[in-house]
Image: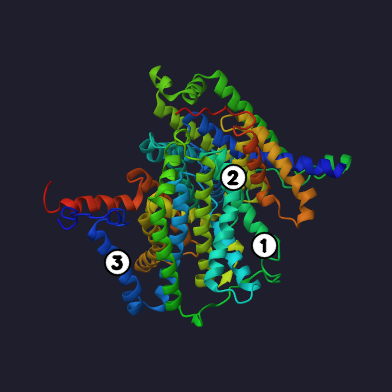
Amino acid sequence: MQFFFEVLIGGLLAGVMYSLVALGFVLIYKASGVFNFAQGAMVFFAALTFVGLQQKFALPFWVAFACTLAVMVALGMLTERIVLRPLVNQPQISLFMATIGLAFFLEGLAQLIWGTEVRPLDIGIKNEPVQWAMDRFNMLIIKTDVAAALVAGLLVSVLAVFFNRTRIGRALRAVADDHQAALAVGIPLKQIWAIVWSVAGFVALVAGLMWGARSGVQFALTFTALKALPVLILGGFESIAGAIVGGLIIGAAEKLAEVYLGPKVGGGIEGWFAYVLALVFLLIRPEGLFGEKRIDRV
Amino acid sequence: MLYREAGQFKTSYAADQQLFPILQDRVAVLAFLLIAFVVVPLIATDYWYSAILIPLLVFSLATIGLNILTGYAGQLSLGSAAFMAVGAVAAYNFQLRVPGMPVLVSFVLGGFMAALVGMIFGLPSLRIKGFYLAVATLAAQFFIPWLLVKVSWFSNDSASGVIAAQPINILGYAFDTPASKYLLVLAIVALLALAAKNMVRGRIGRAWMAVRDMDVAAEVIGIRMLHTKLTAFAVSSFYCGVAGALYAFAYLGTVQPEDFNLDLSFRILFMVIIGGVGSILGSFLGAAFITLLPIFLDVLLTDIARGFNLSLMPGTISMAQLVVFGALIIFFLIVEPHGLARLWQIAKEKLRLWPFPH
C-alpha cells in the first residue's frame, strides 16, 4: 500500500513537471490560437542558455535568471514578428508546421551556441530524498520534485492573478476570446501577442530550470516536453487548470502503469502510455476535461 | 512558346483522360525516365547510388505516402516512420517464414500489413481532426516501434536485436550491387508514383480533396467519411510500408525498428512541406531537397571551416542542419506555402507565354 502511495506521489510530481511545459502551450493557444509545437524547444533553449550563462560567466543565480529571461522575452518577440505575423491568416496547419520548424531551429541553435554535452543544473536544491518522509513513512520523495510542485503552484497563482486582476491580463483574455472584437475595442493585437509569447518564454524558463535540476540539461528534454501534448489533450487546450489537472493525471497514470502493468508486458511502457491514454481520451471527450467544445460551422 | 498546348487536339476520350495530356509533359516524363534508367547507370558511381540516389527514391516513396494522407486527404500524420517500420519488419518476416516467397511479393505483403495497421490507427480520424489527430498518430509512432522490439517473434528472436535483411533475388538474378538495387528501387518507385498520380485525379482522389477542404460539406454531398478516410490511411500506409521495406532491404541492409523514430517522421513531413503539399512531383522535389541538403551543408561547412582554419566540433554539422531545416521550413511556409512544386508550376505558367508578354 505504501509502495503504491510512493509511486503515486512520484507520478503526481512528475506530472507537475509536464504541467509546467503544458502551461506555456495553453498560454499561447489561449491568446493567439496557435499551437506552439516549439514550447519544448523553448524550454530546452531557456535551460541551456541559463546553464551556459551561469557557467561561462560565473554569474550568480538571479543575474543569470534575469539575463535568460531577457533572452526569452526577446526570442518571444522575434518569433511573433518573424514567424507568426506573416502567417496570420493561414490555416492552422501552416502555423503548426511553422512552429515545428521553429522547434528544430531552436534546438539546433541552442546546441550550436552552447554545445551538445549534458549539463547539470544547480538551483540550490539537491536531488536527494526528503529526509522527513524517508524517516516517518519510509517513502522516497525527491526534494527537487517537491520544489517543482511548489514552484508550479506559485506560478499558476501568479498567472491567475495576472490574468484576472491586471489590465493586461484582461486584454489577453479578450484577445483569447475573439481577435476581431478585441481589435474593435482598441486592444493592440500585435503587442498582446508579443506579451503572450514573452510570458510563455518566462514559463518555459521556469519549466526548464525545474526539468534541468531534475535530470540535467540535455537534448532528451525536448522529448519529455513532447509529453505535454497528451497533457493538453486531457486537460483541454485552453485551460490553465486543465494543464495542471491533465499533467497530474498523465504523470500518475504513466508511473502506475509502468510499475503495475509494465512487468506483465516486458517494461518500457512509459514511452507510449501517455499518448495511448490521450488517444483513448480523444475518442471519448475530444475537448478535454476543461476545454471548450469545438463547434464546426460550415 | 515551347510549352503551349494550342494545337494539341484530343480525338478520343482515352486521349482526353490520359495522365499527361500535354505532349511536352509526356516528352519530359519519358525523358526523365530514360535518363534515370539508362543514362544514370552509365555515369553514376557506387557512392552516388548508395548514399544519394537510393535514399532519395525511398524517401520520395514515403513522401508520396504522407502526401496522400496529409496533402490530399488533409489528415495530419506524424506517424509515417512507424508505418515504414511495419512494412520493413513484415516484409522481413514474410520473406523469412514463407519458403520460396518472391521478394517483390513480400514487399507488397509488407505494404499490406502496414496498410492494415494504418487503418487501425486511422480510426480515430473519424472523430478527431487537425493536430488532435497528429497527437493520435504520435501514439502510433511511439507504440509501434516499442511493440516491434518487445515481441521478439518479429525479429526472429535475435539476441542482438539487429536483423540482417535477406538478399534480394528475383527470378534467379541477384540484386546485390548498388547499381542493380538502384534500378530495382527506381522501377518500383516509378510504378507506384504513376499509380499514385492516377489515384489522386480519380474519384477517390477527389473524395480525399473534398474531405481536406471541408469535410462536413463533403459528407453532406454524399462522400462516405469512413470509406474515404480509411482508404487514405490505408493507401498512405501501404506506400510508407513499401518504402520502409525498400529502406531496409535496398538501402540499409538491416531491419531495425529503432531507426524508424520520430525524427524520421518529421523528416518526411518536412519533405512534404518543402516539396509541396498535395503534389506528387512535389514529393520527389522535397525528398531530393532534404536528402541533398545535409550533404551540401556538410561540404559547405567543412570548406568554410578549412577556409578560416577552424576545426569543427563533432556536433556542429548536425546542429547546423537542424537550424537550416527549421529556418527553411519557416521560410517556405511564409514565402511559398505550396512548396517547390508550386514554384515549378509558376515556371511552367511563365513558359507557356515566353517569349511573348501575353
**Tag 2–tag 3 contact (CB < 8 Å):** no
Q: For residue B213, what is the image quadrant?
A: top left
Instruction: Give the amino acid type for the residue marked by disc 3 in the picture.
Output: Leu
Q: Which chain does the residue under circle 3 lie in?
A: B
Tag in front: 1 or 2: 2
Alpha carbon of mark 2 to alpha carbon of mark 3: how far?
39 Å
**Tag 1–tag 2 contact (CB < 8 Å):** no
Q: Nearer the viewer, residue A97 or A214?
A: A97
Residue topped by disc 1: B149
Tag in front: 1 or 3: 3
The circle drawn on residue B306 is: none
Q: How many residues crowd mark 1 within 10 Å: few (<14), some (14–19), many (20+)?
A: some
Q: Residue at x 38, y 56 (%)?
A: B197
Q: Earlier in the sequence, mark 2 or mark 3?
A: 3
Q: Residue at x 13, y 46 (%)?
A: B358
Q: Quadrant of the C terminus of chain A?
A: top left
Q: Which chain does the residue under circle 1 lie in?
A: B
Residue B268 x, y percent position in the rendering: 47, 55
Q: Secondary structure at mark 1?
A: helix
Q: Is residue B174 left or right of residue A188?
A: right
Q: Secondary structure at mark 3?
A: helix
Q: Relative to residue A58, is residue A82 depicted above or below? A: above
Alpha carbon of mark 1 to alpha carbon of mark 3: how far?
43 Å
The circle drawn on residue B123 is: 2
Alpha carbon of mark 1 to alpha carbon of mark 2: how far?
24 Å
Q: For residue B355, what is the image quadrant?
A: bottom left
Residue A39 x, y percent position in the rendering: 53, 42
Residue B103 visible from this viewpoint: yes
Q: Is residue A117 left or right of residue A245?
A: left
Q: Quadrant of the N terminus of chain A?
A: top right
